[in-house]
Amino acid sequence: MNDDSSEDGSEEFGPARYPDTDVDEADTGDVLNSVIDRNHAKLEFQTLDKLPNRDGSIEVVNEDGVPVGLLLIQVKKLNDSDLDPPKFQCPRKYFEYSRVISSPFLLIGVDTVNEVAYWKHFSPEWVDALDLGSKQSKVVHFPEENILDGSSTQYVSDWKEISEDNKRRIRNYDEFERLKEIATPALGESRPEFETIHRFLDEYNGYIDGKFSIIRERLYPGLWKFGFANLDYSDDSVKYGLYPIKQTENDVQIKDLEFPEKGSLFEKYDLSLVSRREHDNFVYNLEENALRHIESVTEDIISKHVLRHTNSEFICREIVFAFVDELYRMLDLDERESYTLEELEYSFDTYLHVWIDTALDWVDEDIDIAGSLIRNQFPSDLLMRISLEDRPRIHEEVESRLDSDESLGFKYRYRAYDMSERVFEEALDALRRRGVETVERPYPIEDLDMDDHDYIWSEYSSEAFEDYVKAYMRNLVEAYRKVSAASFPDMEGVFDDFQGVTDIVVELDAEGRPEEVGPVYYQYWLRDMSGGESEDVSLHFCRKDPDDGFVIDFNDQSSFVNFEGEKYEKMIFRESSLSELLREPPVMSEVYSRIMSDLDEEYFDDV
């Protein structure tokens, strides 16, 4: 008997009643509609006719009412017991849903008691870091600054930034959209090359579904499979492009390209992942051709510094200070040993954008921002066009604009070394999730009061040089193992650079090389012969005695050495210099280099 029975047990007939949650959902909708400014965000929200994984969407618009981003939302009423601090026991299905869609996904928790709401962005990095395992739900804590109360409009800038970041994530799709527009689906046809093409796609997509899934995660979120755009398939050659098919699309995997000037097609449409191979080479080397494409995209990930490295706190600190040291003159920050997370967020999310906007008005010539970004020189090259006398005046104007509560949101992109703002934002977000409040500088700061400034390493004392090398060596092995395991979890045994190494002796020589080379240090990789298995690598530091030879002689014929009373097997000897560590984030750079080298050796060297 159902809940609509009468007291005497007789059946009640009539229309079905509304669900018990109807009143709660109506209250939730009323609060949400009252706290979102519709001049900046267009809310589409349905309380009764809901899709299984979302309740609607929010379209963010600019001052002219033009849409600049779309976010999908799931709205939940918060229990009265979960208001201070605001939190929600979130079913696993919403985390999984956020992984497969290409649009940003927000969970919005509504406090109907105080008539406010809170929001949380389910970013791919945040969801991946949760490590859900077999859990079917997870408590989501809403940041209290992410409040929707009808007065603060900070959320508008935040949502614009999320939308812009998402556009950057899926920009790899954009170039392919042009290809798909001019391609004709090869439907209803039977051609002998289709079997070969399907086998090639199986090889290529198999790598992306398996060992190289990071390609999907970092470059093509929401990807289902890659399709094959056929420009020319003949006995002499095969010319083709590869295009991504999203999970939300119903598209075919083989298309024909028709174009009057086939030879210039790929140049005209600026397509990537393009290959020309002799016919027989393509047909009989499908795996090799698939790997060649995988290699190209993997190199793109390496060059953009977007492996999954945020599980290394040290690398995150390296990244943050690389950006600070490159851009601090535009942030009105002084060089210090540490910064609070709060001042870093304000400097990069607010101050920098107003500074760039102001500085652009001070220069007489137009700045090619797009070209400058490609060269990894923006906004540093903008600073170079401004005289030393004008720089304080620009900061005064910036302060004036900020005093009037002016905020541009995330208006400008920026670079440090060859890293994009995405790399910086992800590093800062990872530190925030770890509960870090103050970010400590990972390496000694240069001493500009040193007498000799002929070389960059001249700005470091012998003690600073030693501290620099120690910080680098103490974090290298752990970072390498963490980043390789997180980025390529299905490649056990591939990343074994330190396999069998139990001890590394580091001999520091601050004075032993000409000034154009700078201070050097020597690494002696050893394996303890006393037995026992351990994943840990012990580090030993010592200063080189100028009157003695190397602390361990790798030139003698013996494979073994006694060091500090223990017997070791000699494995590797390396000589390095401080100048090599000063080029870019050194641990990150070395980790990326080692990972690419490992992949080359395992997969790409023979293709």
Image (tube, rainbow, N blue to C red):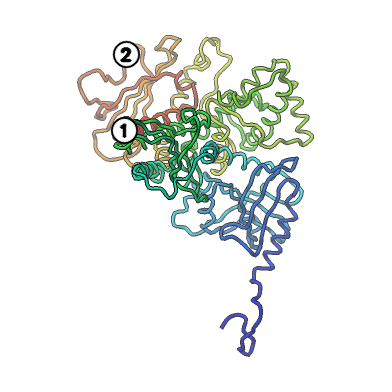
Q: Quadrant of the N terminus?
A: bottom right
What is the three-letter code of the residue carrying label 1? Asn
Q: Nearer the viewer, residue 371 or 362?
A: 371
What is the three-letter code of the residue carrying label 2? Asp
Q: Nearer the viewer, residue 254 or 212?
A: 254
Q: Which residue is mark 2?
A: 548
Q: Quadrant of the C terminus?
A: top left
Neighbor class of circle 2 (other Cα within 10 Å; few <14, some 14-19, many 20+) is: few
Q: Nearer the viewer, residue 498 or 567?
A: 498
Say which quarter of the image contains residue 493: top left
In this orientation, does residue 358 appear? yes
Height in image: 265 above or below 452? Answer: below
What SS does tag 1 mark?
A: helix
Height in image: 192 above or below 555? Answer: below
- Residue at 50% x, 51% y is 250
Image coordinates for residue 105, horizontal then vertical, percent:
59, 50
What SS does tag 2 mark?
A: loop
Q: Which residue is mark 1?
A: 281
Image coordinates for residue 433, horizontal then vertical, percent:
55, 44
Q: Nearer the viewer, residue 427 or 599?
A: 599
